[in-house]
Structures are given as structure tokens and as C-alpha cells.
């Protein structure tokens, strides 16, 4: 039996090649600004422009912090 978690449907940030959020993609819906910001940071890390080893997500409950944190590592190549 496969164990399914709360965020098991998330497969990535749902951004296109221009880092623009898609309507619904890879399990994420909404939070367009946060997804784009996370994608921009990821791109800077991949390009070696910042040494990013950690990101801090802050905000009120139920705003998508965990969902974006779960999607972020799935985008690393």
C-alpha cells in the first residue's frame, strides 16, 4: 500500500520557461507571485549567481508555504 501525504500531488513549481506561473500545473494552483519568486531564486542558484543553500518561507497559516517548499526541490536539475 502506497502512503499518500498531504502534498504528494505536487510535482514542481508550475512555471514555464520564462518563469511565468501556469494556471494549473504540477499540482500547484494559485500563489502565482510566490511561485514566480521561488523560481527566480532557483534560477539564480542554478546560474551560480547566489550560493543559496536555504530559503525561509514566512507567512500566516494556510498560505502555501509548505506546498512551495515541497515543489522547490523537484525543480532542481
Image (spheres, rainbow, N blue to C red):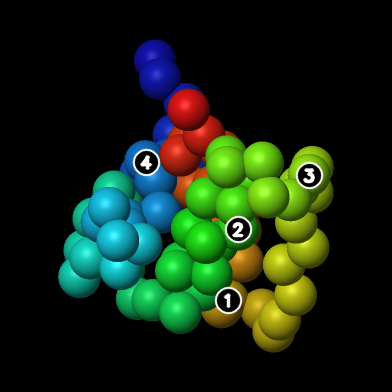
Residue 38 appears anywhere in the view: yes
**What residue is shown with label 1?**
62
**What residue is shown with label 2?**
41
Q: Report the residue at 56% width, 78% height from top.
A: 63
Q: Secondary structure at mark 3?
A: loop
Closer to viewer: mark 4 or mark 1? 4
> Alpha carbon of mark 3 to alpha carbon of mark 1: how far?
29 Å
Q: Earlier in the sequence, mark 2 or mark 4?
A: 4
Q: Find out whether the residues at labels 2 and 3 contact each other: C-beta distance under 8 Å.
A: no
**Could you say which disc has been placed on residue 16 in the image?**
none
Q: Secondary structure at mark 4?
A: loop
Taking the view exactly as shown, the residue that stands out farthest to the bottom is: 60
> Alpha carbon of mark 4 to alpha carbon of mark 1: how far?
19 Å
Tell which of 52 and 69 is nearer to you. 52
Q: Quick check: 48 left or right of 27?
A: right
Pinpoint residue 56: horizontal percent, then vertical percent.
Answer: 78, 63
Q: Report the residue at 68% width, 50% height from top.
A: 49
Closer to viewer: mark 3 or mark 1? 3
Q: Earlier in the sequence, mark 3 or mark 1?
A: 3
Tell which of 19 and 34 is nearer to you. 19
Q: Find out whether the residues at labels 2 and 4 contact each other: C-beta distance under 8 Å.
A: no
**What residue is shown with label 4?**
11
Pinpoint residue 32: horizontal percent, then vertical percent.
Answer: 38, 76
User: Is 36 drawn above or below residue 42 in the view shown?
Assistant: below
Q: Secondary structure at mark 1?
A: loop
Q: Find out whether the residues at labels 3 and 1 contact each other: C-beta distance under 8 Å.
A: no
Amino acid at each position: 500500500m502506497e502512503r499518500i501525504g498531504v502534498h504528494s500531488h505536487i510535482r514542481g513549481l508550475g512555471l514555464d520557461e520564462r518563469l511565468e506561473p501556469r494556471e494549473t500545473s504540477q499540482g500547484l494552483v494559485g500563489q502565482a507571485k510566490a511561485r514566480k519568486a521561488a523560481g527566480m531564486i532557483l534560477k539564480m542558484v542554478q546560474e551560480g549567481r547566489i550560493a543559496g543553500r536555504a530559503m525561509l518561507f514566512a507567512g500566516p497559516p494556510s498560505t502555501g508555504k509548505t506546498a512551495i517548499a515541497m515543489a522547490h526541490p523537484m525543480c532542481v536539475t
